[in-house]
Amino acid sequence: MIKTKVKNKLHAYEIGLEITRNCNLNCSHCLRGNTQNKTMSKEVIHEVFNKVDTITNIFFSGGEPLLAIDVIEEIIKEIKRRDIEINGFGMVTNGTVFNDKIHDVLFELYELSIDKNSCIVEISNDVFHNDSIYNFPNCEDMLRNKRKLETLVFVNKRQYIDYSNYHLLKEGRCKEGHVITKPQITLDKFKDGTIEVFNDFYVNIYGDLISSCSIAYDRQKEFKFASIFDDKEKIMSELTELYLTQGL
């Protein structure tokens, strides 16, 4: 949770962590692009918690985040080691990956979270994901995993999305929709120098800080404003610049 503000501190209401670029599906509307066999390193995880003073909620992004359950486990270790309070967590999954370790790690994170209502795992439910699943020879196993995942208390199956009436992003493999051209980050800066970021504080697998979470892998450099390995003063300075130019 966000605690009493201290001078020149960096607070993230929701931090997005791109923990993997690996995915077991091949959806035609995927805004990320083609799958990459890459995951977030321990070094990036450690620097996130070194540079961000308090985090309210963590959003796990991919790729398919449940393919990187070891990374989530490492994040839990870091939270425990530093005695950090986390309000809640979230992710969107295709729901086709499930095993005992995934069950145990997700429940450990759930138990660590203060607000159980802020712990939300959503299963994608649309024509693109559903068609992609049925193209695989092991689709019955995938559907069985979905049903198991849906039994967890913090898992919700999304209402079916009809993309004929939905705003697609023309990113990655998607060939229609609108293109993001401006940073989407929202933040406040206080007189004591504290910066509080409310959304789209996004860290990719390399530790790049991206000003929008809805960008294809091959366009992320256009939206990079700093690196988690930079000095904290530089990160704060770049965030201040975003603050001053937002809406222009």
Image (tube, rainbow, N blue to C red):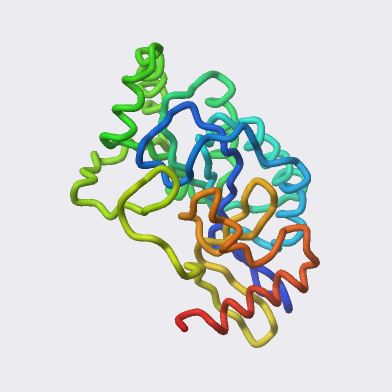
Residue 21 x, y percent position in the rendering: 57, 38
The N terminus - image quarter: bottom right
192, above or below 2, in the image: below
Residue 239 x, y percent position in the rendering: 63, 74
Please state which of residues 28 and 25 is positioned toward the viewer in this rendering. 28
164, above or below 63, in the image: below
47, above or below 237, in the image: above
**Total residue callouts:** 0
Q: Residue furthest right?
A: 231
Residue 62 x, y percent position in the rendering: 53, 41
Residue at image point 42% right, 63% down = 180
135, above or below 52, in the image: above
Residue at image point 69% right, 61% down = 52
Residue 170 x, y percent position in the rendering: 37, 53
Classify residue 69 as left or right of residue 77: left
For residue 243, which quarter of the picture? Answer: bottom right
Please state which of residues 80 and 25 is positioned toward the viewer in this rendering. 25
Q: Residue furthest front?
A: 175
Classify residue 39 as left or right of residue 152: right
